[in-house]
């Protein structure tokens, strides 16, 4: 494409046409700047500016880390499952799905940074890794997964890029041989990526699930639960993004794909229901100490959140998706997907809050809060964690960054799978 | 002030110094502590001196005294309507199988040869995973700049950097000069005994044997170096 | 090789690496090796100074001040007592005192009031300006109204014989009246002078460990005798039993074998019932009663006075008393120079006898013990149950348990005797301890440890310069004016009080019936307060003198709890512009009368300490062989028996009661016991008028009648473990623990009835005043009691001047029968008042 002789009117027309995009990108940059400023402010003052304390020592950042790890699941299902189980239907959205996964896991990795008290010592993770720490396992798998996803995206768009002559094809061509190699690589990747995805969600689960100090987390079901909730949110994200992209005219696929994905989402939700029920029954049945945490969710302080998660966050999408006429309507499926994402978010929120906000040893006065309380006890047995404006800004900044990466990617990269070849 | 500086241990009066000496130990000691709940009166002297000794800022306590009751210093009703209350001093248990050491991604929490679990505040990245892992809730994070009631720092060690995790060190700086931890020194009722768990004849081991010492949250399998002596069974009138 | 941790760690690292399938560099990290920085020694200091913690707490605990760059960076117990059972001594309050030396409330400069009194508005001033002001005002008032209209008030001389002594010295020189603290605080257990003729009786703390049975009555040593409470545990470890009598479940109750919940203020009835049961069971040591007490001395039934030799023979032997010898079936007269009975005499303890007086009249006489027994006879366990609400069966078991273990100690606290009729509680338990032969016996005794009242050295050369007598007026009369029954020997100023010099006391919130005190304050023309913290009292001063803490001056201290004489030694120079009391008075007196100052105030603390040491250095004197140089090195045991217990010479050598109570003369206190024996029968007119000749029980008394129906709660203003009275109220470290808000402990049922929830603001009020604090609900509270620990500064309440809005200042006329300040003087009753509680009105929450 050459930019030599374009009439002024055409430029104006083009800019006018692109105005929403320019505004969108400007908005994202602004939010990122605010997020960056908030991060610098937090860095200068310490994490005291967050709502976290010794009582709830992980908050919004880890919540979003977890959530985005989960969101990254969709890409792999669509790509790998499509290939491994030969589901051709997924083809039109495969590129979108792997791109979404890549961006999601990138954001997950970024969310670790503001959570550190000493982000400038990040390098210590690589200089002095302690391999008994699930966190080290997780960082390794996140990095590996990120690399894999990025490669996957490239693999899918490579041929188109090569056809365009883009340098992003890295000199690979579109010869039959190259395409055949691409197909082989895609198949091989599918075999690697699926276990990698399972590992990613399992290890993230083990960060929590291996901690004997946290009764609510210490459970073998943690990994299956994480995988399932990741499948729910990841798939829901793909559905939503795909529908948005179709609406924007950047992607073409039929409603039968939407219905199929919706059905799949419904099945994942059902599995999550089952796992949740199994976990709660096992924990609550003996009426033993561990039951307290579950009681807080069922009838206690977190019951509103929990029942929101179960009844609205998962129940409503399930019902929508179980009803065939609704499932066939993309608007309903989009709504179900959006609600399911919210449901999984609340699910993760419950995990963090209920896992941490009560001291393990429930004898008064409790745990030292870690911040001067002015006049008043500096101990607490529980803590009502509310993220501060700083945390919201940092999160917003990271989200804006993700949206920007995604936006730029779909502008640069050909997202539409060629009709057939 | 141009006075020449001396070690606070060397500057102690002779009688005070000998009061605080650790005493006999094996060739390769494993330091431990016994806390006698029969003698603990919940006065927090050990916690306060810890705060002073280690320049622990406001809002943070390395050492605290839990009330085994309904609220601070209030009893709870037990079977038969009787009231009971005991106190449980709680600081780092210096576990032999420490969850915090396991989970620290950068090895900033580690074991010393003498059984103490230490924190390297120059290596710590402030991820607080160790706090998640610790079942005793004894680790605390430096959320911001230290706030003190006095205009200057106190104590006998440097304050730890913001953004890192800290906890009881068993007054390792005092052990280096053959003095018991400050909480042991300052307990007005003699509820704390410090010594070598590797020495079968040590007072700590003797007490654990005679008084049926127990480990806090034994089911967690952490193997603490701090042992508790249960309160005695009361005789009725 | 067994799988130790190190190999496990290495193994798992390898596994983890394999699982991850990556080849990140594994740095060889020494897992268990120490690193350089963690074996670093303590940061160095300039020096370590040995001194003594000296709030008004009786602990008198040796402390070390660690000084770095001229600043105290740590305070820790010295733990250097030669009698090592006393180590370490010291509690969390003393260890956190650093926050008061350098805290926000420290007064740094002299201040002169600019706003209304109480507004706390001041301007900074120079020392010269304030000293000139104090001197000129004192001279004006002294000359206009008489120097005795200036009242000097300070607390507990035991915590600083030299600096607090400077207040006495100046008062004696200028003729100002000095106040009292031991009686004013209600800590003077009036049962002691009445029964034993002494100011107080207390075994040194380590002697508790020798006991076989510990009866803790209204005391909470676990929270308020922290440095010494371990001696109780030592006794328990050796097999002693401990029983706690307390309406409220206290920290001490949690350690006891049994906790007996008594109705507040009825301890005397319990004591009498215990004696009753012991007599019934035949467990009483009646020989002990004959030997050491007035039990066998005959009392005339016509006059209620004792039968004297003068009555029989018409001579002037008013100090010879009469017993009925059952062997001779005749009255025998005995003297007061020695306890015991003449050989062969079997003195009757019961019965009535006819004797003929020298004028021929026949009178009926009876041994005093018969009268005591008659009263005790009324107090069956069942009768006591009706009053105390303790099951009769429990009382019986307690009596048998106490009487069958020897030695058995009674440990009484303010909860039992801080009452209008607290003297009767003391007399009942004095009887219990005596009738079981536990007096003057290691591991036994009847001890009260409230207040660092004790003057253990000869202070006269310092307190009474040139032999000048000190005019001491019990401060209760300063608070509420003279009473009709006031003892004529009280040097109450003719013109009333016109000025106050308040030294190291938060008296404007800590005195009983506080609003009444504030009426008195309104009449004062001049108020000076010397303190180091910006207390509520300071806010009412006209002139504020910044004072040093005990880490910035030299002083001499001792306590009833242990027999070691110690120095306070300056660890640092005075903070800000603060000065010691001695410096203040030297300058004030110099401005008033340079001649007096030159003669009596041109002395240093060293001089004063030497004066006191020398005065007691005679053979057998308290400071025999003790030098200032020794004291600089550490604590030195006073010249007292080991263990130091009261009445040893009376019990062992049959020396007459009472032993001397310093600083009073023996003659002064001997007047309390005309028989020179332990007295359970009091013959003075007022005892007879009030029907209190023998130990008995009286209901709580409040001069503002508070009908229980209308005022259902007994207000218990207990001592808190977090404070020493109002000192440490503002300690940030301690506030972090307890929350820094005044709370009232009430029973959940009482709260529910009033719709009060945990932490709700509640209004507590009676006809004297009201306050708003936060509700704390716990089964620890006895229904019908409201416990608000005294000492909170007003800023920790939602409203009100604090707990003393509600307390009573009424004077018991029994306390005015004799007058020796702090020994037989009006002791306040803090706990008689009743209150009502409701949810706080909107707006104050």
Image (cartoon, coloured by chain):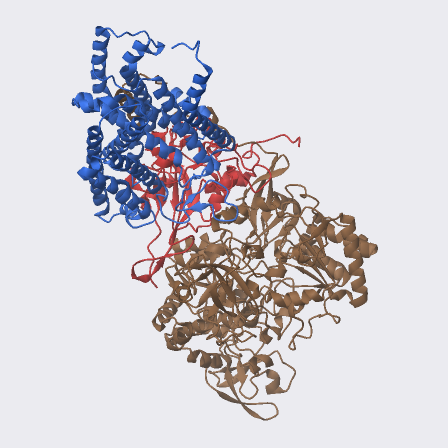
Chain colours: A blue, B red, C brown
- Front-most of residues A141 and C31: A141
Q: Quadrant of residue A58?
A: top left
Query: Please, is residue A241 above or below residue A273 in the view?
Result: above
- Front-most of residues C197 and A383: A383
Query: Please, is residue A229 above or below residue A404 in the view?
Result: below
Q: Residue C354's x, y, as percent?
A: 51, 90
Work out which quarter of the rendered image holds the N terminus of chain B and state it. top right
Q: Quadrant of residue C570?
A: top right
Instruction: Judge left or right: residue A91 versus residue C599.
Output: left
Q: Residue A176's x, y, as percent?
A: 21, 7
Work out which quarter of the rendered image holds the C terminus of chain B and state it. bottom left
Query: Please, is residue C127 above or below residue A175 in the view?
Result: below
Residue A61 appears in view: yes
Q: Residue C411's x, y, as percent?
A: 47, 62
Instruction: Judge left or right: residue B23 versus residue A244.
Output: right
Q: Residue B233's x, y, as percent?
A: 32, 55
Query: Please, is residue A101 above or below residue A168 in the view?
Result: below
Residue C347 appears in view: no
Which residue reaches farthest right? C595
């Amino acid at each position: 494409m050459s930019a030599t002789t374009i009439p002024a009117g055409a430029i104006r027309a083009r800019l006018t046409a692109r105005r929403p995009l320019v505004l969108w990108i400007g908005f994202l940059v602004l939010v990122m700047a605010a997020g960056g400023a908030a991060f610098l402010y937090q860095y200068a003052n310490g994490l005291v500016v967050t709502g976290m304390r010794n009582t709830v020592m992980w908050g919004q950042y880890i919540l979003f880390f977890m959530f985005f790890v989960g969101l990254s699941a969709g890409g792999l299902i669509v790509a790998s499952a499509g290939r491994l189980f030969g589901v051709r239907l997924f083809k039109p959205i495969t590129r979108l799905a792997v791109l979404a996964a890549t961006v999601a896991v990138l954001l997950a990795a970024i969310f670790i940074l503001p959570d550190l008290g000493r982000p400038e010592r990040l390098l210590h993770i690589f200089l002095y890794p302690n391999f008994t720490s699930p966190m080290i396992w997780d960082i390794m798998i996140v990095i590996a997964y990120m690399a894999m996803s990025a490669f996957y995206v490239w693999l899918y768009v490579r041929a188109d890029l090569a056809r365009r002559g883009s340098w992003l094809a890295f000199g690979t061509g579109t010869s039959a041989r190259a395409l055949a190699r691409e197909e082989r690589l895609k198949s091989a990747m599918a075999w690697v990526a699926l276990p990698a995805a399972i590992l990613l969600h399992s290890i993230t689960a083990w960060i929590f699930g291996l901690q004997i100090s946290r009764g609510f987390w210490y459970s073998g079901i943690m990994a299956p639960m994480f995988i399932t909730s990741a499948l729910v949110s990841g798939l829901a994200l793909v559905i939503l993004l795909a529908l948005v992209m179709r609406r924007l005219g950047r992607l073409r696929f039929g409603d039968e794909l939407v219905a199929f994905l919706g059905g799949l989402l419904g099945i994942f939700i059902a599995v999550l229901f089952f796992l949740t029920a199994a976990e709660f029954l096992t924990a609550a049945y003996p009426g033993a100490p561990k039951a307290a945490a579950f009681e807080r969710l069922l009838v206690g302080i977190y019951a509103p959140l929990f029942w929101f998660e179960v009844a609205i966050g998962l129940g409503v999408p399930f019902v929508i998706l179980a009803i065939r006429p609704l499932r066939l309507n993309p608007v309903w499926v989009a709504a179900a997907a959006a609600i399911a994402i919210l449901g999984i978010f609340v699910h993760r929120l419950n995990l963090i809050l209920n896992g941490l906000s009560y001291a393990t040893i429930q004898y008064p006065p409790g745990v030292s809060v870690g911040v001067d309380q002015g006049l008043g006890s500096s101990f607490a047995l529980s803590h009502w964690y509310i993220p501060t404006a700083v945390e919201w800004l940092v999160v917003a900044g990271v989200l804006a960054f993700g949206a920007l990466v995604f936006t730029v990617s779909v502008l640069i990269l050909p997202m539409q799978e060629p009709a057939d070849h | 002030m141009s006075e020449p500086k001396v070690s606070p241990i060397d500057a102690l009066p002779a009688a005070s110094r000998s009061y605080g000496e650790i005493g006999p130990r094996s060739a390769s000691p494993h330091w431990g502590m016994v806390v006698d709940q029969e003698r603990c009166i919940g006065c927090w002297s050990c916690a306060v001196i810890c705060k002073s000794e280690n320049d622990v800022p406001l809002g943070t306590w390395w050492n605290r005294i839990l009330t085994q009751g309904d609220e601070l210093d209030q009893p709870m009703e037990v079977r038969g309507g009787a009231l009971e209350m005991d106190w449980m001093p709680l600081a780092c248990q210096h576990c032999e199988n420490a969850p915090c050491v396991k989970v620290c991604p950068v090895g900033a929490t580690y074991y010393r040869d003498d059984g103490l679990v230490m924190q390297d505040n120059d290596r710590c990245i402030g991820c607080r995973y160790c706090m998640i892992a610790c079942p005793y809730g004894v680790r605390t994070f430096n959320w911001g700049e230290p706030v003190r009631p006095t205009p200057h720092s106190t104590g006998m060690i440097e304050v730890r950097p913001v953004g890192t995790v800290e906890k009881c060190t068993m007054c390792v700086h005092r052990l280096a000069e053959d003095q018991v931890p400050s909480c042991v020194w300052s307990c007005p009722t003699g509820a704390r005994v410090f010594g070598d768990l590797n020495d079968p004849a040590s007072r700590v081991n003797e007490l654990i044997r005679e008084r049926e010492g127990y480990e806090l949250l034994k089911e967690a399998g952490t193997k603490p170096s701090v042992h508790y002596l249960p309160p005695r069974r009361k005789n009725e009138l | 090789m067994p799988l130790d941790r190190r190999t496990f760690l290495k193994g798992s690292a390898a596994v983890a690496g394999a699982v991850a399938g990556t080849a990140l560099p594994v740095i060889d990290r020494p897992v268990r090796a120490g690193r350089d920085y963690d074996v670093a020694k303590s940061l160095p200091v300039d020096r370590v100074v040995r001194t003594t913690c000296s709030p008004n707490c009786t602990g008198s605990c040796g402390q070390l001040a660690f000084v770095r760059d001229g600043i105290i960076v740590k305070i820790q117990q010295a733990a250097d007592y030669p009698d090592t059972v006393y180590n370490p001594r010291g509690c969390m309050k003393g260890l956190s005192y650093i926050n008061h030396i350098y805290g926000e409330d420290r007064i740094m400069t002299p201040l002169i009031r600019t706003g209304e009194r109480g507004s706390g508005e001041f301007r900074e001033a120079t020392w010269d300006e304030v000293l000139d002001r104090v001197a000129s005002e004192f001279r004006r008032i002294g000359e206009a109204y008489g120097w005795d209209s200036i009242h000097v008030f300070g607390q507990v001389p035991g915590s600083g014989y030299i600096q607090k002594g400077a207040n006495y010295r100046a008062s004696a020189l200028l003729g100002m009246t000095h106040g009292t603290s031991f009686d004013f605080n209600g800590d003077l257990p009036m049962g002691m002078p009445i029964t034993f003729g002494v100011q107080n009786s207390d075994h040194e703390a380590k002697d508790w460990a020798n006991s076989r049975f510990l009866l803790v009555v209204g005391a909470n040593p676990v929270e308020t005798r922290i440095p010494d409470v371990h001696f109780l545990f030592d006794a328990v470890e050796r097999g002693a039993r401990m029983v706690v009598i307390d309406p409220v479940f206290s920290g001490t109750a949690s350690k006891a074998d049994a906790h007996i919940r008594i109705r507040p203020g009825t301890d005397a009835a319990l004591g009498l019932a215990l004696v009753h049961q012991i007599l019934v069971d035949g467990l009483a040591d009646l020989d002990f009663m004959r030997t050491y007490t007035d039990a066998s001395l005959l009392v005339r039934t016509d006059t209620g006075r004792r039968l004297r030799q003068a009555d029989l023979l018409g001579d002037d032997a008013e100090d010879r008393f009469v017993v009925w010898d059952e062997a001779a079936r005749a009255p025998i007269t005995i003297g007061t120079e020695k306890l015991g009975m003449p050989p062969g005499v079997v003195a009757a303890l019961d019965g009535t006898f006819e004797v003929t007086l020298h004028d021929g009249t026949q009178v009926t006489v009876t041994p005093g013990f018969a009268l005591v027994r008659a009263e005790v006879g009324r107090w069956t366990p069942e009768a006591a149950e009706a009053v105390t609400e303790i099951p009769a069966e429990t009382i019986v078991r307690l009596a048998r348990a106490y009487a069958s273990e020897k030695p058995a100690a009674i440990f009484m606290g303010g909860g039992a005797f801080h009452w209008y009729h607290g003297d009767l509680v003391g007399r009942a338990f004095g009887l219990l301890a005596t009738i079981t032969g536990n007096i003057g016996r290691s591991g036994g005794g009847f001890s009260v440890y409230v207040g660092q009242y004790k003057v253990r050295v000869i202070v006269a050369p310092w307190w009474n310069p040139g032999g000048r007598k000190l005019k001491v007026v019990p401060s209760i009369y300063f608070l509420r004016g003279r009473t009709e029954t006031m003892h004529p020997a009280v040097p109450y100023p003719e013109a009333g009080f016109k000025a106050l010099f308040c030294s190291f006391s938060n008296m404007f919130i800590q005195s009983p019936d506080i609003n009444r005190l504030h009426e008195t304050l309104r009449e004062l023309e001049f108020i000076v307060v010397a303190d180091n913290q910006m207390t509520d009292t300071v806010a009412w001063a006209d002139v504020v003198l910044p004072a040093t803490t005990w880490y910035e001056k030299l002083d001499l201290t001792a306590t009833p709890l242990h027999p070691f004489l110690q120095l306070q030694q300056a660890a640092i120079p005075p903070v800000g512009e603060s000065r010691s009391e001695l410096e203040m008075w030297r300058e004030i007196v110099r401005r008033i009368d340079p001649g007096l100052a030159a003669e009596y105030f041109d002395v240093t603390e060293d001089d004063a300490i030497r004066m006191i040491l020398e005065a007691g250095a005679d053979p057998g004197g308290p400071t025999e062989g003790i030098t200032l140089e020794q004291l600089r090195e550490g604590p030195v045991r006073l010249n007292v028996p080991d263990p130091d217990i009261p009445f040893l010479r009376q019990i062992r050598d049959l020396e007459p009661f009472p032993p001397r109570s310093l600083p009073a003369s023996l003659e002064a206190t001997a007047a309390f016991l005309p028989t020179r024996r332990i007295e359970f029968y009091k013959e003075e007119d007022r005892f007879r008028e009030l029907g209190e000749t023998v130990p008995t029980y009286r209901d709580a008394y409040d001069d503002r009648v508070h009908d229980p129906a209308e005022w259902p709660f007994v207000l218990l203003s207990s001592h808190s473990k977090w404070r020493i009275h109002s000192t440490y109220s503002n300690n940030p470290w301690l506030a972090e623990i307890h929350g820094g808000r005044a709370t009232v402990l009430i029973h959940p049922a009482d709260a529910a009835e009033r719709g009060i929830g945990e932490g709700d603001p509640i209004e507590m009020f009676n006809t004297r005043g009201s306050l708003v604090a936060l509700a704390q609900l716990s089964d620890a509270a006895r229904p019908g009691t409201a416990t608000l620990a005294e000492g909170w500064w007003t800023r920790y309440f939602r409203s009100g001047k604090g707990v003393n809005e509600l307390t009573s200042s009424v004077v018991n006329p029994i306390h005015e029968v004799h007058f020796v300040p702090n020994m037989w003087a009006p002791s306040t009753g803090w706990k008689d008042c009743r209150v009502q509680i409701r949810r706080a009105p909107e707006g104050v929450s």
